Every structure is written in structure tokens, then in C-alpha cells.
Amino acid sequence: MSELLLDRVADDVVTALETGMAPAGEHSRLYEDLGFDSLMLIELVDRLQERRPALGELPLPDMVGGMADIGSLTDLLRTATEPAQAAVQPAEAVQPAQAVGAEGNAA
Amino acid sequence: MTTGGASAVLPASTAIAEPLQVTPQGPWHTVRRELAERGSVVVFARLDDWLSDFQPDTDTDGTGADTGSGAGSALPALLGRDWERFAQMTNEDVRGRFLASRLLLKYAAAAVLEARPADIDLAYKPGGRPYLRGCDQVDISLSHTADLLVVGITRRGWIGVDAELSSRRLRGSAVERQICTPHETELLAQAGEQARNTALVRLWTLKEAYSKAIGQGLRFRFTEFGFAPGARRVQVLRPDGTPGSGDEWSFCTWSVAGQYTVSVALVDLGFDDAVDVAARTMLDEGMAEALLRRPQDTRWTARRDTEGPLA
């Protein structure tokens, strides 16, 4: 079950990165809605790197603050791989980091 | 899950005793005694034991509005600042574990602070680390997975707990690649497949417990500190395997209920002078009265007053 969920989320995020569209389930929260735990977050990041090598190294500690939902995770990856474009975005367009709700520290 | 189902898989530290199984009915006097005698206590519980007494009333509009009059109607007051987040959760399994873990934590904290669960103000630091607002004399940590809930409480310093299904497959996964130091990878390579998975689950729970204790959680790089799989004395190691922490840290791992691995990390910061951590003792009189006064809704509370953590 969790393998299928991991594959689906990874596919949705990669598709969104490739098409420039919003990901399916954009507002689905990884913990509260999809039931991710800490180990699943690690697996998800690994699947994203595997499916889209251009993302490069994705250390979880650097990402965990921006993985609250599928949309924020996609935005985080877009920003990480498009630094030049992100640099010319107006300041008000930059969303504040959202902490993952996976209870990484609480549970 | 059976009662009393915890056993050490490593030599138990004198600072941390075997986890105690609890239900809403206790035994809370044992929890209080454990904290008084050792300075720390770890409790575990079965999810259903806590959910059966606290089913939320139907919330048809999803706003978190209090719609019933049963035990569930006391949940908003009992969950406090967690109520809004709980009410917006859509995943039933997540909701159940979130609710039960907060109830367990509040009952356990209430027992050692000699307060009532609804008066425990559970708050979160910016990184997500839970703490008891206004009760700095004790540190807390919680973990839940599948059917298991675990809470650690200490008055010695900082504590972190973590639980995982012992059968969870980690060998050969991204987790194995992303949490192990070079030294750990070298040691694990010498083990058979089953032993390697057992060691990995233990390493994962130890690292999570340690990272929670220092307030970092997943923001800490798990490849930059480690433990020696199978070592008799558990201590934090640098990536090359040399010692990285002193005697102030204690670690322990247990097998709980025959199917879970539970680890605890505890650092003794010398906060052991105050044996009496009761909220009334630690607060000034006016503050204690305001914090511990009886709430207006007494139906549920009256029942818990006789059966709850102060029993």
C-alpha cells in the first residue's frame, strides 16, 4: 500500500515538474491526508531523485521544511532546480517555507 | 498486544527502566513512582485502549465544532491547541494515532505533574518538538506507529523516544543508504539479511530518538552520527566510528509487545534536584490556581477524576 502511494506521489510531482502544471492532489498534505511517516519521506525523496536525476542531491534535512503538501514540495523542487528564474521572481511571489506535518519531531 | 510486553534487547541503562504499559485507567501511581525514583519514565499503550474511551463526536461540517454531548465533546478542551489540526485531518488512521498519542501524553504528564489532563498545555517549538508550556521542569517526547503509542518523560534533562515495527523492511532500501554512516555500513555488511534488517530498525529508532532529544528531528543529518550495531554500551559515534558523546547520554532499545522496536535517548543535564515536580510545587500559588482550576464542563471530568491519572 505505501509503495503504491509513494510511487503515485513521486509520479505526480515529477509530471508537474516536467509539464510546468500544478501537480495532481496539489493540496494533499503528506502527513495529515496521505499518512506519510518519516521513513516514507526518505523513500519519497529517493524516488524523486531516481525519476528525475536533474534534481541532483536532495538532502532531506534541507527539504523537510518545505514538504507540507504535494504543491509545496513541487514548488520547493522547482525553486531548487531553477535558481536563475527564482532569483528574478518578485519578492511577494516567494512563498514562505511550510513545515512538513509528518511529526518528524513530535512522533 | 499483551500487558507487560517490553523486554530489553540491549543491557538496560540504570537511568531508564523498562517501558510501562498504561491505559486511561493507569497504573498512574506506578508512573509517578518511576519518575520520582529514576528521574525518567517511558510508557507505552495500545491504540485501541485509548480510542475506545474517546471517540470524537460527529463533526459533519469539518469545522471542528463541538457537536455532541458524549465523552467526545470534551475533546476540544482536552486537545487544546491540537484540536484545530486534529479536526482538519482527513486520514482516519492518522487521526486515530494523533488523538490517542496526545491523550496518552496528556494523561502521563498529568500523572507526574499531579494535574488534570485537560490542564496540560501541550505546545510545539518551531521545529515541531513538543513541550509542556509552563512546566519546564519536565521534558517529554512521543512516538506512534501502527497500533503502538510511546511517551517518554524526564526531569533530568532532554528525552527522545521512537518506535517502529520490528518487521519493517529497511535493508536494501533508500533508508539504509540515507541513514547509515560509513562505519555502520561496514559493520552491517557483515551481518545476514535478517540480522541486518533488525539492526537497521534499531539504528533508525536510536537515531530518531537522539535527534528528537536534541530537538532536530528530520532536520539532522543521520549520516553524520551513528551507533555501533550490537555494541554492549550504546553511545553516539562519529561517522568514522570514534566516540562522539560523553557519559551524560543514555540509550536503550526494547522489544515491545513482540512486534515493535522502541528506543530512548536521554541526556542528563543535571536537572535532578527537584524530586517533587507536581505543578503546584513548581508554580506560584496564583498561577497554580489559575492553571489547575476546575473547568465548567464537569460531566466527563468527574468520571476521570476518580479513574484518571491521579487515581
Image (cartoon, coloured by chain):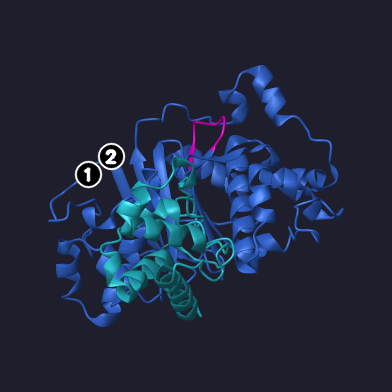
Chain colours: A cyan, B blue
Q: Position of residue B160 (x, y in %)?
A: 41, 49
The residue that appears at 19% across and 64% down in the rendered structure is B184
The numbered disc on residue A20 is: none
Residue shown at 22%/53% (left/top)?
B224
The residue identified by callout 1 is B245
State if disc 2 and disc 1 touch (CB < 8 Å): yes
Majority SS type along the magenta span: loop
Q: Secondary structure at mark 2?
A: loop
Three-letter residue code for mark 1: Ser
- Dot 2: within a 10 Å radius of its alpha carbon, few (fewer than 14), some, or many (20 or more) residues? few
Q: Quadrant of residue B95?
A: bottom right
Q: Nearer the viewer, residue A14 or B104?
A: A14
How crowded is the residue under tag 1: few (<14 C-alpha within 10 Å), some, or many (20+)? few
Residue B283 appears at what percent x and percent y? 59, 22
Using the image, determine if residue B102 lies above or below residue A3: above
The residue carrying mark 2 is B248
Is residue A61 visible in this depiction of the protein?
A: no
Indicate the position of residue B67 as horizontal and vertical percent values. 85, 54
Q: Nearer the viewer, residue A88 or B64?
A: A88
In percent of the image, x 34 and y 37: which residue is there?
B268
Report if residue B199 lies within the magenta region: no
The quadrant holding residue A53 is: bottom left
Q: Chain of mark 1?
A: B
Question: Does dot 1 land on a helix, a strand or a loop?
Answer: loop
Calculate the distance from the C-alpha at mark 1 to the C-alpha at mark 2. 8 Å
What are the residue bounds of the magenta stretch? B132-140
Query: What residue is at 76 percent from the left and 47 percent from the top?
Result: B304
Q: Chain of mark 2?
A: B
Q: Amino acid at mark 2?
A: Glu
